[in-house]
C-alpha cells in the first residue's frame, strides 16, 4: 500500500521507544512520508480520537512503540480513521504488538511493499441512558501520577437517539468496557441484560464486557476464558461477585450486553480499555455492542496466538509435567490436513504452511 501519512504513538518513558521513534522518522524522511506524533498530551490536556487524528493529518498508518497499553492508545486512533495499525513490542507481557524494535524498519518496508496480512479485530461501542461525565473532584484525584484523563465520550451525531436504546456515544474499545465500584467498602449492584432480557443481578467489585482480544486482559485476570482473537463473541465476566454464580457468559456478537446500576448501589465508574471515561449513578445504564467498525492490525505473517499464550503464561514450565520426562513437542502436525479436514483453517507448521 502507499503510505502517505504516518501517526506515531510513543511510550515516552522508555529510552528504547524513543530510539525506535528516531528510526521511524528516518524511514519516513527517506520515503517522503509525513510523520506526526499523536496522543502526546503536548498542551497539558487530552483530546478525542477525532481531534487527535485531525491534528496528525489523518494518518493512513499508525505505529505504536511500547507495550500493549501503548497499542491500545494507537488502536483508539487507528479505528477512528480506519487506518492500519502496526504495534512494535517494547512491553513485558504483550499479546497485541507484532514486531520487535530492531525489526521496525523491515516491518515498515513490508507495509509499503504490501507483504503483510491485515488482522481484522472486533471492537466494542456503547449507548447509555445519558452522557458520560467525570466529576471534577475525581478528575483531580486521577491526574495524580497518571497525566490527564481522556475526555468523556462525545455523542454520535450520525446515529438516532432513542428513549429505550439510549444515547449513542463515540466509543471504541479493543479490549473491554468495565463498570466498577468507586468506593472500596461498597460494591456496585448491577442488573445484567443479554439481548434486552434480564440475566441476573450482581453485587460485585466490577462487571466487564470484553472482546476476544480482551479475553487475555482484565477478563482473564478475573477468571474469564481465553478466547481466540479470530472468534466473534462478547465475553461478560463478573469480578468478585457476592453470589454463587460467578462464571463468565459468552454471547454472540449480535447479542448486546446491558448493565444497569440498581437503586441501592453506590456510584459506578465506566472504564474503556482501562481509561476512566465517566461515572454513573443508580438508575443509569449502558448497553455494550459489537461495533460495525473493525480494527485493521498489521501482521507480517500468521499470528501464532496459542504459541504466544504458551510463552507469556509459561504453560510448559509446570514442574510436575517437566518431571515426567521429555517435554511435549511444540508442533504435533507438519503436513497439510487430509481431505475431510481441508475446510478448516489453522496453522499446521512452524513456518505457517
Image (cartoon, rainbow, N blue to C red):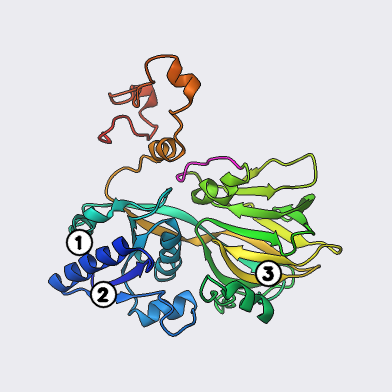
Question: Where residue 105 sits: x, y (%)?
Answer: 19, 59
**Labels 3 and 2 touching (C-beta < 8 A):** no
Q: Secondary structure at mark 3?
A: strand
**C-alpha separation, residue under disc 3 versus residue under disc 2:** 36 Å
The majority secondary structure of the magenta stretch comes to: loop
Question: Where residue 301 sits: x, y (%)?
Answer: 28, 45
Where is 277 relative to 223, above or below? below
Give the mark toward the camera: 3 or 2: 2
In the rendered view, does 182 fall on the left or right side of 155?
A: right
Mark 3: few/some/many CA within 10 Å (<14, 14-19, 20+): many
Q: Is residue 2 visible?
A: no
Q: Residue at x 20, y 61 (%)?
A: 112
* Quadrant of the frame with the C terminus: top left
Question: Where residue 158 sits: x, y (%)?
Answer: 54, 76
In the rendered view, does 39 fall on the left or right side of 110?
A: right
Q: Quadrant of residue 108?
A: bottom left
Read off the residue under disc 1.
Answer: 112
Read off the residue under disc 2.
Answer: 35
If you read the primary sequence from the N terminus, does the residue marked by circle 3 or circle 2 appear first? 2
If you read the primary sequence from the N terminus, does the residue marked by circle 1 or circle 2 appear first? 2
**C-alpha separation, residue under disc 3 versus residue under disc 1:** 41 Å
Q: Secondary structure at mark 1?
A: helix
Q: Quadrant of residue 84?
A: bottom left
Q: Which residues are magenta?
A: 224-230
Q: Is residue 186 visible?
A: yes
In the rendered view, does 60 fall on the left or right side of 318?
A: left
* Quadrant of the frame with the N terminus: bottom left
**C-alpha separation, residue under disc 1 versus residue under disc 2:** 15 Å
In the rendered view, does 279 fall on the left or right side of 150?
A: right
Q: Residue at x 33, y 22 (%)?
A: 338
Read off the residue under disc 3.
Answer: 128
If you read the primary sequence from the N terminus, does the residue marked by circle 3 or circle 1 appear first? 1
Amino acid at each position: 500500500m502507499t503510505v502517505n501519512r504516518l501517526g506515531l504513538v510513543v511510550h515516552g518513558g522508555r529510552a528504547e521507544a524513543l530510539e525506535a521513534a528516531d528510526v521511524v522518522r528516518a524511514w519516513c524522511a527517506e520515503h517522503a512520508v509525513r510523520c506526526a506524533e499523536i496522543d502526546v498530551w503536548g498542551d497539558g490536556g487530552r483530546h478525542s480520537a477525532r481531534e487527535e487524528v485531525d491534528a496528525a493529518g489523518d494518518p493512513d498508518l499508525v505505529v505504536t512503540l511500547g507495550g500493549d497499553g501503548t497499542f491500545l492508545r494507537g488502536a483508539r486512533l487507528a479505528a477512528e480513521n480506519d487506518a492500519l495499525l502496526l504495534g512494535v513490542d517494547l512491553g513485558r507481557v504483550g499479546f497485541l504488538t507484532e514486531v520487535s524494535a530492531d525489526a521496525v524498519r523491515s516491518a515498515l518496508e513490508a507495509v509499503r511493499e504490501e507483504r503483510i496480512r491485515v488482522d481484522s479485530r472486533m471492537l466494542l461501542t456503547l449507548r447509555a441512558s445519558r452522557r458520560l461525565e467525570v466529576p471534577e473532584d475525581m478528575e483531580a484525584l486521577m491526574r495524580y501520577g497518571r497525566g490527564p484523563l481522556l475526555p468523556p465520550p462525545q455523542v454520535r451525531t450520525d446515529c438516532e437517539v432513542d428513549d429505550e436504546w439510549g444515547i449513542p456515544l463515540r466509543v471504541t474499545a479493543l479490549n473491554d468496557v468495565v463498570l466498577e465500584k468507586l468506593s472500596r467498602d461498597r460494591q456496585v449492584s448491577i442488573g445484567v441484560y443479554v439481548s434486552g432480557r434480564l440475566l441476573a443481578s450482581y453485587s460485585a467489585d466490577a462487571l466487564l464486557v470484553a472482546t476476544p482480544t480482551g479475553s487475555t486482559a482484565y477478563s482473564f485476570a478475573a477468571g474469564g476464558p481465553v478466547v481466540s482473537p479470530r472468534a466473534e463473541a462478547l465475553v461478560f465476566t463478573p469480578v468478585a461477585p457476592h453470589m454463587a454464580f460467578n462464571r463468565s457468559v459468552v454471547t454472540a456478537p449480535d447479542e448486546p450486553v446491558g448493565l444497569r446500576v440498581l437503586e441501592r448501589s453506590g456510584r459506578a465508574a465506566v472504564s474503556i480499555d482501562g481509561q476512566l471515561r465517566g461515572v454513573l449513578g443508580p438508575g443509569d445504564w449502558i448497553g455494550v455492542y459489537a461495533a460495525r467498525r473493525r480494527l485493521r492490525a498489521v501482521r507480517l505473517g500468521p499470528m501464532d496466538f496459542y504459541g504466544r499464550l504458551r510463552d507469556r503464561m509459561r504453560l510448559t514450565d509446570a514442574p510436575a509435567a517437566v518431571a515426567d520426562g521429555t517435554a511435549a513437542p511444540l508442533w504435533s502436525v507438519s503436513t497439510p490436513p487430509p481431505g475431510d479436514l481441508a475446510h478448516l483453517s489453522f496453522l499446521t507448521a512452524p513456518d505457517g504452511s
